[in-house]
């Protein structure tokens, strides 16, 4: 199957009053060639923070899918070139194929790291963007994410995912622990310590994580805030798994196994008021995921003989089968844009790969192929990127790609064995 083209159109960079913009219209897409020289530093304190800043900033821009970040090895401009347009030899940047130039300057002021970003149109020499941000000096990557977000917003007129958080499971020996990290895998912190903890999901505001744990020798669903105590919210049946917070954060959907069946339930976020949405004796209904308006739930059911993706209203009515290709479709995640659901499928060679299916038409599009097993996808808060696990380089690592399957990159997380990532909504204060 052909990869679904991301609906992005890059308008030409020309000498007009309007700055170049990446708009969400049409099917043509050409990443904007951009030169991003190493950050300039204003004092010795900033020099020590260049490396962590630059690593996060470069990854944000490269993974965004909208920019072609040019290799610095080919740059011919003077490394001491300043921030102002008058000090820049734009012909040198045009010679390496850059259509845009991003300059960053860093300065440390006590416990604060300050950064200034300037964006130039190489063809005209015009300054299109000037923005300043700051962050704690011990978190240079946060400043990088803030400046990258400002640049992304300038080009697309929508928020980036760079200030969001992800959660995932990291396996170590017989233990499986839940972690919360920056979107790129940096600044990771363990939420649990020891035992078997699986299938984490972040709440709407990112302040809580729901996960399944075996701490009482059976799989129950707990909710925990970073630094807080874990509280049981669903404890019943033989197995409670797959918690997912509703878009308003007031409810959770999950699967509860009893006897020879498993049903999808919805309850209040504290576990009260639980009620079953499915009722298929001897059938398995699992992996619920909410539509962005909170009115529908997609889930996996084997009621037709094999695991397939279904959709139903939030009251359990209007059940509709969505996938018909393949005989093993799992782990759906509904795009925040509402149009697509991404899922894992096992193909005819018993390889696991990622696909999207159109909610309205049922059209299935393949995203990964011939690169190990690729599983457990989750959309970014703006629906433009997908995080997933892949074994292409040995072990199960975290990767990110654009929603059409392009630009597949490993996250900046430490080496390890990772499972079931989930992506939180954007924080309210950015």
Image (spheres, grey):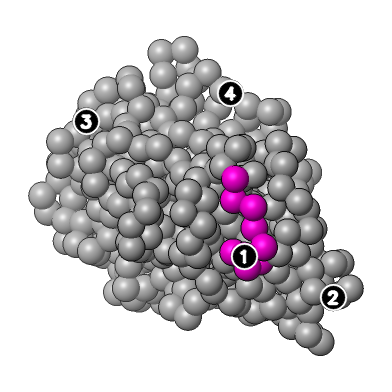
Residue at image position (78%, 53%) is: 79
Of residues 270 and 139, the one nearer the viewer is 139
- Identify the residue under disc 1: 86
Extreme bottom residue here? 110
What's drawn in magenta, residue-wise?
Answer: 83-91
Choose the circle earlier in sequence order: 4 or 3: 3
Choose the circle earlier in sequence order: 4 or 1: 1
- Identify the residue under disc 3: 363
Choose the circle earlier in sequence order: 2 or 3: 2
Q: Disc 4, disc 1: CB below 8 Å? A: no
- Identify the residue under disc 2: 43
- Identify the residue under disc 4: 372
Front label number (2 vs 1): 1
Extreme left residue here? 318
Residue at image position (15%, 36%) is: 361
Q: Give the class, few, some or many, for how many residues have Cα within 10 Å of label 3's Cα (few <14, many ≥20).
A: some
The CA distance from mark 2 to mark 1 is: 23 Å
């Amino acid at each position: 199957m052909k990869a679904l083209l991301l609906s992005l159109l890059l308008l030409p960079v020309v000498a007009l009053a309007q700055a170049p913009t990446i708009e969400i219209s049409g099917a043509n897409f050409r990443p904007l060639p951009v030169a991003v020289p190493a950050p300039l530093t204003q004092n010795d304190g900033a020099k020590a923070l260049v490396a962590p800043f630059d690593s996060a900033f470069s990854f944000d821009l490269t993974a965004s899918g909208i920019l072609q970040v040019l290799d610095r090895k080919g740059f011919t401009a003077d490394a001491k070139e300043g921030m102002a347009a008058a000090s820049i030899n734009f012909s040198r940047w045009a010679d390496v194929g850059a259509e845009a130039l991003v300059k960053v300057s860093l300065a440390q002021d006590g416990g604060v790291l300050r950064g200034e970003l300037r964006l130039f149109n190489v063809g005209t020499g015009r300054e299109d963007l000037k923005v300043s941000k700051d962050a704690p000096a011990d978190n240079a990557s946060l400043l990088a994410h803030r400046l990258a977000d400002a640049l992304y917003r300038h080009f697309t007129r929508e928020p980036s995912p760079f200030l969001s958080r992800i959660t995932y499971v990291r396996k170590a020996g017989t233990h499986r622990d839940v972690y919360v990290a920056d979107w790129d895998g940096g600044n990771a912190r363990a939420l649990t310590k020891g035992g078997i903890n699986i299938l984490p999901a972040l709440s709407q505001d990112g302040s809580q994580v729901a996960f399944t744990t075996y701490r009482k020798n059976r799989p129950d669903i707990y909710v925990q805030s970073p630094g807080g105590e874990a509280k049981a919210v669903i404890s019943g049946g033989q197995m409670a798994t797959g918690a997912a917070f509703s878009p308003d954060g007031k409810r959770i959907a999950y699967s509860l196994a009893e006897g020879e069946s498993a049903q999808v339930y919805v309850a209040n976020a504290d576990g009260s008021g639980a009620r079953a949405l499915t009722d298929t004796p001897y059938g398995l209904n699992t992996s619920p995921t909410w539509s962005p308006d909170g009115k529908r739930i997609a889930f996996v059911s084997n009621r037709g003989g094999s695991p397939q993706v279904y959709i139903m209203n939030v009251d359990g009515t209007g059940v509709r089968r969505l996938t018909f290709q393949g005989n093993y479709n799992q782990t759906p995640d509904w795009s925040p844009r509402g149009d697509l659901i991404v899922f894992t499928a096992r193909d005819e060679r018993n390889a696991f790969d990622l696909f999207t299916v159109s909610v309205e038409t049922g059209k299935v599009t393949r995203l990964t192929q011939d690169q190990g097993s690729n599983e457990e996808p989750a959309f970014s808060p703006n629906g433009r990127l997908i995080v997933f696990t892949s074994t292409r380089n040995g072990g199960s690592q975290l990767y990110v790609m654009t929603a059409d399957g392009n630009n597949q990159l490993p996250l900046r997380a430490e080496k390890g064995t990772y499972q079931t990532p989930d992506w939180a909504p954007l924080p309210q204060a950015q």
